[in-house]
Image (tube, coloured by chain):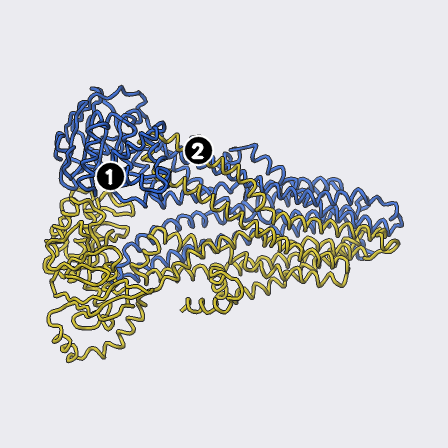
Chain colours: A yellow, B blue
Amino acid sequence: MQQQTLKKKQAAVSSRVKTLEALFLGELANLQSVKYHSAQAVGVVFAVSLVVQAWALANVFSEMALHQSFSLSYLVIGLLALLMRAFANFARERICADASRAIRYDLRRKLLSHLTKLGPARLIIDEDAALSTRVYEQVDALDDYFSRYKPQVFMVALIPSVILLSVMSVSWITFFIFMLTAPLVILFMIFVGHKAAQANRRQFNVLAMLSNQFMDLSQGLAELKRLGRTREARDRLSDSATAYQKTTMGVLALAFLSTATLELFASLSIAMIALYLGLGLLEILPWQVGSSPVTLTQAMFLLLLAPEFYLPLRQLGNDYHAKQKAEAAATDLLEIMNAPIQSPHLQTQKKTSTTETETQPPSETAYYYAIDGQALLRFKDLSWFEEGRYRLAPINAHVSQGERIWISGESGVGKSSLLHLLLGFEENYQGQCLINGQPFRHLNLSNWRKNLAWLPQTPEWVNGSIRRNVLLGITPPSEQAIQTALIKSQCDAFIQALPDGLDTKLTELGSGLSGGQMQRLSIARALLSNADVWLLDEPCSGLDNETAQAVLTTLEQASKGKTLLIVSHDTHPILWADKHWVLTKRGLHE
Amino acid sequence: MSKKLSLKRLLLANPWYFAIPIVLGVISSLAGVALLGISGWFISATGLATAMGVGLAFNYLTPGAIVRLMAILRTAGRYGEQVTAHNHLLSLLRTLRLWVWDQRVAQNPANLHQQSRGDLLQRLVSDLDQIIRWPLVVFLPWLYALLSYGAVSLLAYIILPTLLWPLSIAALLHLLLVPYVCGQFASHAVHVGQILGVHRRSRFISVFSALITLTIRGHWQTYAQRLKQLDERQRQTEIRIQNAISLGRLGCYGVTIALLAVSLFMVGEYQADTGRWGLLADVQGTWVVGFTLSLLAVNELVLPLAQSFVAQGQSQVGLRRLNQLQPDPSIQDKKTIAPIQQMQFRTWRGFHAASGMGNAPIDLDIQTGDSIWIGGASGAGKSTLLAAMAGDCLSSGNALINNQTCELYNNPSYQAQLSYLPQSPYVFQQSIEANLRLGNPNATTESLWSVLDAVSLGDWARALPNGLNTLLSSQGRNLSGGQRKRLALARLLLRQAPILLLDEPFDGLDTHTIEKICESLQGPYKPNMLLLVSHVSSPLGNQSRKITL
């Protein structure tokens, strides 16, 4: 849905050059438009109190200079206006931070649910650890953009206009100084900013390269220690950092030129206005000798407003990196959001609940059974065509209850896709997939899934004890049943050797358990879940040959009586399988 | 370089590099305050001069020149400060990375393996990035504000010495109290936030790595709910930090307003006849204008302080985490070992620190010229035994080197004499040549080629368009497992260490390649002692003494 609107919007503004990232950020900001509008209203209060403060203080100052005394009411107005500014600033900050939080936490929820729906397909984008960086760190990297840059863009337009308006009636010359410098500042900002952005990017890349080098050498530190080459590696780190530092001065000098331009204009304008006003007050302006263009109060007023005129632009210049950072993060986030979901999980369930009544009549079910006989699974011209090529070539096959099937084939022919389809994560297939004679799409997905056990290449673990992990998501069976399953999967020996036995904690680091032992635990889990259909995706690919053979032998004995679909390369043949399917780009060969 | 890291050390790391941005920044900040103050004085003085009829005699050239000078100083100073400060930042980054490197080099192997996981290292790197910014975002703004206060005090002293009282109280509030209170108010939240961040991340990885199992069992929702709760808690800490910063800034404004009110109150007295506030007799109105304007300029310098002290809390959390890297001082066997002639192991057992799993105790004697093939069932602890013999893994029992008891674990002088090929060796993201030269930096190009031929990678390397200069991708991902292992083996062979320990070197290789490697290991690259763990039979294994675990 969101992508579609995004694409439409993109088409609409295709005449203007706007990147997908900028659009994405704009889209997100629109979600909180109410908050941004109120922030803008507060911004107006801020701008008005700015002018009031300048006016009141100007009066105080001129009276003080000329008469050595001043009216208290002006001072009170001036200080109240300053207080008003402080509160407006406070409110604006809170509102914008709130908007940014709402956007970010909402986006994070969306990302999480999207990743959930992607299921196994999420790993195409990246591994889980890297995804977590995107979901947490990268989303937070948007903060400065939404809380500072985005609202500041409005202030940059607002404050100078308000100041120009109030200056117009006071002094035309000052008005023109402002009017002339403002576009010049912006022009120079764009001109220098473009170069600076390039320089910035280059610096960013080289810094990333340095980080990369540090990471690489650090990860291989154990190896370097064994080779006795840590000193050389340290010199290498040191040298490249020093070399980079030396060459980077030029880049930095350019990168900061845009801020310097702004500063220069701001400073010079203040100085120019001060000089002009001073000379004017002395009545010795070359074109106006003997009379003053402004009164002292007006001069003070102009002087107080001069720095404020350039301040918002300067702040925007400082926050410019926030925009770059946000756009870089948006690239990574868009990759997740744009990954197509194959199975809108909830929709499927809704659909099944409505269609259930239609497919429920026993006669119809019996009819399907009559056709399919014993087949538990039947594929009819099942294929998956996407982006102009087959991810799974059309296949015809059937699996009976209790059959064990070895699926092999070169990578990329859709072996895993087939399993993902049976798990209910791929819906956009063509042809038919029948379960017990019922079309897969009409199936009650959660009931079907309860029948499944899933054993992927890297076993699925949560932080917690071995017990918690093998009982993950099932009602705890008796201790006897657990023991039986552990013996069947040949886990009992090594678990007994562990000091804490079944209660040994498994963390992300593992617990010193080998890959083979982890796979055996997966087998125990599958046994305990009482699932009839086991789906295995290259369970042995991470293991050495010997361990793999041992695991396969265990699997052979443990899975008797179950329906098994096991994907495995020819290097790990499943000799005890009832059937061997070879998937190729043209289809399936038994 | 092995001392504890502290914020003070960050400041003093490269004092000369740091002095330049400080001086430039101070000049720029003071010029900014002076620009506004002098302009205010100048305008009011000119106005006064004209009103008093002495306008033509007024010396406007000097103040005018000063105003322009200040404008230029402010710009040039700010620019120079930014450039040099970032240059300093880079040198700090270098210093700190080298510090982290030194700490990690001093770690013992078991800890090192634990820290070498990608995401932990990633966090380390981002901690570094966080704390190197401390001098720039916390220390420098604070220093500028302090010095501007000093400059304004000078002006206040000239106008009316008693003005120093409200000024010093305001300075105390602005520079110390408000930032401190903000920092305190937020510090707990900052701390909790950092811990939550780590926790949330590991929960995410843990839950998502079991996504499919949880989904098919219908329990995904409850687990996902927990992630949302953690996120909600994170949001609360974020709100708290934000509140601290915003309130701090509001407080700064309040202090400025009070300071303005009190100062203007002190320089004058109420004139009952006109209902106005008249300045004291010896106070110049024009100077007061300049003073008030400089106070407004100082206010701008003080505002960022509330935020910077919250950033200080973040830097401190980062520092604490980095300091945890410091290894415990361990006693190392410093004595050098004579060339190893024989090794004896008595009731020797290697085991992993975390689980205590390893091999059953063995007795083993090895002499120069020996070649031993260690076999045994999967899970018997062959790899652990070999790693312990390589000094990479904890062990129990006695090891005698040249008939002398010797601690093998983490003993550099022992490890200098051996080459150990672990099950998954690391290939660096460098060229093939650089990877090989880690074995022997002085090797000739011919010897590089011959060692590549020895592990039968020579033809592969010759076929590459860039030959030995081919850059390998991160962790050698563009190599197959077998190639990676052979490249690492080639690197070890270049070292020509007397003892060679090989863990499953033939996994995933065809018979022809295995024969070729065995030939090299029995011929030109024959080590004095060889220990081989392999489940595949090979010519090398067949000619070795075989022990089974």
Above or below — where is B121 with respect to A394? Answer: above
Cα separation between marks 1 and 2: 35 Å
Q: Secondary structure at mark 2?
A: loop
Q: Whole-percent x and y of residue A187?
A: 64, 55
Q: Which residue is mark 2?
A: B4
Is residue A362 shown left or right of residue A153?
left
Q: Give the chain of mark 2.
A: B
Query: Closest to the observer: A38 or A288?
Result: A288
Name the residue located 15 percent from the left edge and 39 percent from the top edge. Answer: B536
Where residue B106 sits in the image (x, y, percent)?
36, 31
Q: Position of residue B342 (x, y in %)?
A: 19, 22
Q: Is residue B231 left or right of residue B61?
A: left
Q: Residue at x 31, y 20 (%)?
A: B335
Relative to residue A359, is residue B306 depicted above or below? above
Q: Chain of mark 1?
A: B
Indicate the amino acid at tag 2.
Answer: Lys
The tag on residue B460 is: none
Residue at 16 percent across and 53 percent down: it is A524
Residue A530 lies in what quarter of the image? Answer: bottom left
In the image, taking residue A69 as reference, residue A501 lies left or right, namely: left
* Crowding at mark 2 (Cα within 10 Å: few <14, some 14-19, many 20+): some
Q: Which numbered disc flags the more N-terminal residue, 1 or 2? A: 2
Q: Which mark is residue B423?
A: 1
| Number of marks present in the image shown | 2
Q: Residue at x 15, y 52 (%)?
A: A573
Q: Position of residue B544 (x, y in %)?
A: 14, 30
The amino acid type found where label 1 is placed reads Gln
